[in-house]
Image (spheres, rainbow, N blue to C red):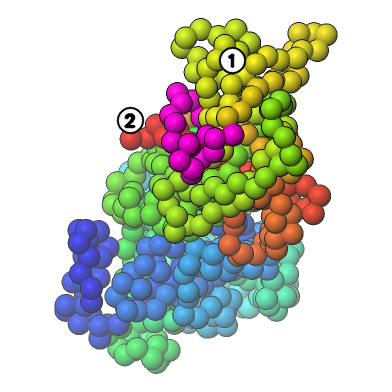
């Protein structure tokens, strides 16, 4: 295996130790097991990078397994978006599995559990069961149904599966230890009845569905997973994970595993990802979508993968972010500024520069004659290898209103009457001569003259000025809409605040402006932008404004750009 210069994280240390000791015959197999009940968010990406990254680094395989054990919340739409997001991030799975692939095997195992006297059907309500669980310092109270006869348990469980028992009336519980200090061992629920919703794959075939703690470890076992890597909230579940494996592994498993009698998966946990100024709760994100507080799961303010993609984040930047924050056993909060920093570092080397005018006022060059000309500008200054673009130049231009002052002091270096020279980006040097106003005193037109011998890139174009301003030629300019996105919440940690989290939304998280932009982006009006596809997004730096990406809402008649981030980077400060 290749040795990385950076130090190994603790999961990698575990893997390398297992390889050195020949555990599981030196085989490395991981899995990413999302529940298809929503869209992936950046917290999931941390797990994706770990699961797929371990497999890539140690020449193993990572499978994708959908944990589809709750038909009330799951849908094929989520399956498709999860596959698409993982592919967009640049990862490849070995095979696709579903927990529902194992429904029959899991049901048969539950029957064996009952026959061994290790499971019973409980008729108490969910509230009663929760109340009888006890506390971490006080033992629980046994269910009155805990010692019902094995044959009766079998009959009831089979009746549950046949659909003869109403949803919510009965559950199957493992009979373990109601006094165990680990609350998860206090007769955990193995199966519950769900008859109100058909399953997205199996339809109405099943009326009982396994709980996560029962299904997950066994699914790992069936597939041959060697390292079952998950986040820290599952650390307290690990003893139960091992307990079920112990009950069914080896001779008791009756040869269900093709990986030998000594094989068993091992669960390991790392810290979750929490980022400032957003929420990672799927429930809260669903509220935002359903109540129209955001424009959908792919709203660029959302921490979903599709939202980040629409915002303009690249797979490379997101994976770089994961590398920087690392994997530990300590929970913490990551500054969103770091995420913004990594996308700036990525785009500043790759995003072509274009001029865009956000608050336009017309500039007329009074001594310019002719129909206009085509200038050549580098896509990124100083990087000829990244190509050039054509900029139309003529007598009438759009410039930023703030780049002209009718009366200015000596600290203002941009356009103002009085002989001050200013360079138009990648073109000529001009001097303002005056302006025109409307009846309200607002400037409508600025007048200037230009030096025809000062063209950028020519011998006369080397003359220095104290200011350079952006412009676009009026006749060739495109009208465009820009969506200026900011942080979704106005507080750093909305999850820690009291009250309704929706009251903490940032009222200025989206500002929409209509601008003038270079005609070189006209081709974007015909580009094949796929809203839900994995086409390469087109990124630009709008000079002096920030980094932007073409939005899928763009049509043949309207260019729409989303701001990924501003130019200013405060993170390192």
Q: In front: 283, or 531?
A: 531
Q: Position of residue 42 (x, y in %)?
A: 49, 52
Q: Secondary structure at mark 1?
A: loop
Q: Is residue 397 above or below residue 531?
A: above
Principal secondary structure, stretch drawn in magenta:
loop
Residue 351 seen anywhere in this rendered image of the structure: yes
Residue 264 seen anywhere in this rendered image of the structure: no
Residue shown at the point (43%, 29%) measured from the top left = 464
Q: Answer with the quarter of the image where residue 332 lies.
A: top left
Residue shown at the point (70%, 60%) measured from the top left = 527
Q: Position of residue 46 (x, y in %)?
A: 42, 56
Q: Is residue 254 above or below residue 78?
A: below
Q: In front: 466, or 95?
A: 466
Residue shown at the point (54%, 54%) measured from the top left = 388
State which region is magenta: 452-468
First in residue order: circle 1 vs circle 2: 1
Q: In front: 162, or 537?
A: 537
Q: How many marks?
A: 2
Q: Secondary structure at mark 2?
A: loop
Residue 286: image tag: none
Q: Answer with the quarter of the image where residue 503 lies.
A: top right
Q: Position of residue 474 (x, y in %)?
A: 74, 36
- Left or right of 374 on screen, residue 146: left
Q: Are marks 1 and 2 in contact (CB under 8 Å)?
A: no
Asked if residue 490 is among those painted magenta in the image, a careful observer would answer no
Mark toward the viewer: 1 or 2: 1
Q: Dot 2: few (<14), some (14–19), or many (≥20) neighbours within 10 Å?
A: few
Q: Dot 1: few (<14), some (14–19), or many (≥20) neighbours within 10 Å?
A: many
Q: Which residue is mark 2?
A: 573
Residue 416: image tag: 1
């Amino acid at each position: 295996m290749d040795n990385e210069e950076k130090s190994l994280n603790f999961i990698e240390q575990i893997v390398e130790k297992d390889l050195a000791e020949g555990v599981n015959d030196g085989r490395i197999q991981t899995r990413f097991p999302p529940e298809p009940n929503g869209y992936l968010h950046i917290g999931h990406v941390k797990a994706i990078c770990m699961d797929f990254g371990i497999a890539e680094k140690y020449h193993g395989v990572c499978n994708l397994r959908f944990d589809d054990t709750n038909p009330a919340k799951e849908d094929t739409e989520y399956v498709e978006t999860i596959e698409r997001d993982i592919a967009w991030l640049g990862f490849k799975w070995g095979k696709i599995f579903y927990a529902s692939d194992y429904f029959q095997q899991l049901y048969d195992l539950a029957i064996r559990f009952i026959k061994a006297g290790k499971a019973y059907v409980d008729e108490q309500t969910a509230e009663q069961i929760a109340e009888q669980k006890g506390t971490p310092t006080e033992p629980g109270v046994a269910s009155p149904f805990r010692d019902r006869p094995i044959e009766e348990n079998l009959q009831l469980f089979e009746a549950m599966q046949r659909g003869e028992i109403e949803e919510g009336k009965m559950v199957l519980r493992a009979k373990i230890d109601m006094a165990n200090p680990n609350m998860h061992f206090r007769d955990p629920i193995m199966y519950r009845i769900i008859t109100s919703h058909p399953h997205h794959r199996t339809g109405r075939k099943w009326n009982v569905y396994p709980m996560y703690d029962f299904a997950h470890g066994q699914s790992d076992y069936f597939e041959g997973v060697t390292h079952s890597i998950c986040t820290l909230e599952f650390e307290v579940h690990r003893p139960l994970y091992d307990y079920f494996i112990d009950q069914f592994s080896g001779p008791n498993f009756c040869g269900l595993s093709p990986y030998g009698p000594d094989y068993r998966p091992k669960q390991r946990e790392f810290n979750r990802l929490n980022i400032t100024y957003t929420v990672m709760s799927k429930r809260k994100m669903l509220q935002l979508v359903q109540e129209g507080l955001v424009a959908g799961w792919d709203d660029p303010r959302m921490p979903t993968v599709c939202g980040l993609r629409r915002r303009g984040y690249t797979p490379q930047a997101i994976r770089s972010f994961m590398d920087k924050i690392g994997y530990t056993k300590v929970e913490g909060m990551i500054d969103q500024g770091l995420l913004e920093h990594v996308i700036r570092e990525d785009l500043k080397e790759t995003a072509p520069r274009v001029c865009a005018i956000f608050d336009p006022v017309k500039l007329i060059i009074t001594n310019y004659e002719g129909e206009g000309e085509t200038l050549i500008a580098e896509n990124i200054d100083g990087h000829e290898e990244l190509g050039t673009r054509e900029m139309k130049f003529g007598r009438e231009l759009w410039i930023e209103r703030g780049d002209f002052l009718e009366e200015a002091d000596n600290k203002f270096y941009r356009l103002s009457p009085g002989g001050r020279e200013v360079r138009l980006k990648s073109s000529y040097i001009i001097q303002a001569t005056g302006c025109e106003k409307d009846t309200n005193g607002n400037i409508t037109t600025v007048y200037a003259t230009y030096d025809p011998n000062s063209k950028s890139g020519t011998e006369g174009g080397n003359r220095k000025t104290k200011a350079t301003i952006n412009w676009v030629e009026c006749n060739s300019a495109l009208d465009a809409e820009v969506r200026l996105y900011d942080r979704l919440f106005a507080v750093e940690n909305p999850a820690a605040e009291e009250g309704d989290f929706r009251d903490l939304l940032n009222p200025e998280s989206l500002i929409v402006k209509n601008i003038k932009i270079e005609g070189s982006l006209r081709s974007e009006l015909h580009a094949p932008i796929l809203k839900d596809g994995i086409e390469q997004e087109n990124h630009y730096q709008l000079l002096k404004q920030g980094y932007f990406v073409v939005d899928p809402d763009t049509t043949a008649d309207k260019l729409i750009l989303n701001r990924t981030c501003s130019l200013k980077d405060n993170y390192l400060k």
